[in-house]
Image (cartoon, rainbow, N blue to C red):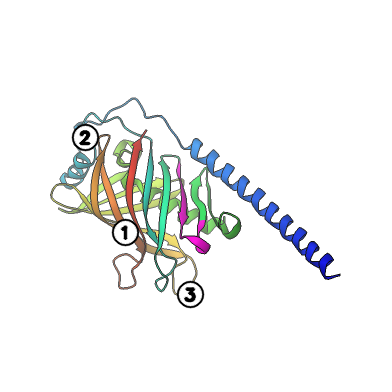
């Protein structure tokens, strides 16, 4: 009798693992399809000083530092990165490897975090008015699978908030409205699929980005409910890739600029390809 029970348990476990594996294969296929859909060819236009000539001097300084004159205006960028991530202020940092495609049509971030028994794999994406976070333990056991209006709104904020990696998307002809707060603070307002996003950047005297912030929809309030929360990052290094100079090392988190700041991710770019 015991043997029959053990065989039954074994068969049940095998069925569960099979179902989980099929679900993971479908999730990977979905991620691959989104990845391909976000690859956009560059428009047949090159950056010139005239494109920013009417903007305030600090904003001009940023663009002329970020995009070399004559650079093709990219519609997307592929990023490969490594770093570390943590899930809460009292949690340990976990190693992180990820790749991302950021496009004027959305983004997808495919990541592996942690190691050994605590390794998680999955993706965070937004495109076509759909946003989702989906991560699983060992690529099998679901940990997060969220897709709802709050996740969508937060994903739109992340999408636009990472345009510092795709400076061509922030040009006035792409719909961004710019103003200078002072000599070293600039602000862009843009529409992202119905959401108004306000990005504030701190720059130095050469136009290099030092810090970026935005009000982003998230569930990091004290009561755990969703609200607009100051979100952003500090940029420790930059590199030039294909005519674009962007942050290459950064840390980011919620409640940026307050005493509640929770830095949960640190990344360093390894490879960057604009398209």
Local packing at callout 2 (Cα closer than 10 Å; few below 14, some 14-19, many 20+) is some
The percent position of residue 120, horizontal first and vertical second, equals 51, 58
Magenta extent: 106-120
Nearest to the eye among marks 2 and 3: give it: 2
Q: Mark 3 points at which residue?
A: 223
Real-space CA distance between mark 2 and mark 3, rounded to the nearest whole angstrom: 46 Å
Q: Work out whether mark 1 precedes mark 3 in sequence or the reverse, and give the earlier one.
A: 3
**243 shown above or below 25:** above
Local packing at callout 1 (Cα closer than 10 Å; few below 14, some 14-19, many 20+) is some
The percent position of residue 88, horizontal first and vertical second, equals 43, 69
Residue 251, which numbered label?
Answer: 1
Nearest to the eye among marks 1 and 3: give it: 1
Real-space CA distance between mark 1 and mark 2, rounded to the nearest whole angstrom: 26 Å
Q: Mark 2 points at which residue?
A: 68
Q: How many labels does the image show?
A: 3
Foreground of the two, 222 or 93: 93
| Res 40 → quadrant | top left
Q: Which residue is drawn at 47% across and 54% down?
A: 112
């Amino acid at each position: 009798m015991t043997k029959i029970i053990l065989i039954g348990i074994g068969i049940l476990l095998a069925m569960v693992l099979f179902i989980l594996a099929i679900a993971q294969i479908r999730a990977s296929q979905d991620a691959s399809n989104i990845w391909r859909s976000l690859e956009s060819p560059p428009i047949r236009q090159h950056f010139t000083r005239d494109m920013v000539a009417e903007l305030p001097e600090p904003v001009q300084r940023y663009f002329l530092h970020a995009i070399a004159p004559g650079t093709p205006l990219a519609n997307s960028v592929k990023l490969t990165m490594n770093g570390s991530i943590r899930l809460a202020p009292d949690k340990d940092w976990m190693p992180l490897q990820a790749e991302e495609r950021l496009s004027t049509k959305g983004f997808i971030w495919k990541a592996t975090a942690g190691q050994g028994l605590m390794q998680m794999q999955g993706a965070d994406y937004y495109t076509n008015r759909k946003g989702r976070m989906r991560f699983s333990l060992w690529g099998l056991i679901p940990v997060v699978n969220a897709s709802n209006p709050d996740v969508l709104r937060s994903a739109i904020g992340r999408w636009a908030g990472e345009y510092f990696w795709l400076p061509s998307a922030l040009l006035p002809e792409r719909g961004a409205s710019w103003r200078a707060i002072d000599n070293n603070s600039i602000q862009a307002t843009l529409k992202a699929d119905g959401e108004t996003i306000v990005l504030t950047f701190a720059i130095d005297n050469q136009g290099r980005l030092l810090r970026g912030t935005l009000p982003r929809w998230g569930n990091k309030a004290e009561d755990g409910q969703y609200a607009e929360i100051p979100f952003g990052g500090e940029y420790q290094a930059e590199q030039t890739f294909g005519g674009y100079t962007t942050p290459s090392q950064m840390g980011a988190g919620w409640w940026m600029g307050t005493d509640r700041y929770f830095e949960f991710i640190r990344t360093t770019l390894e490879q960057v390809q604009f398209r």
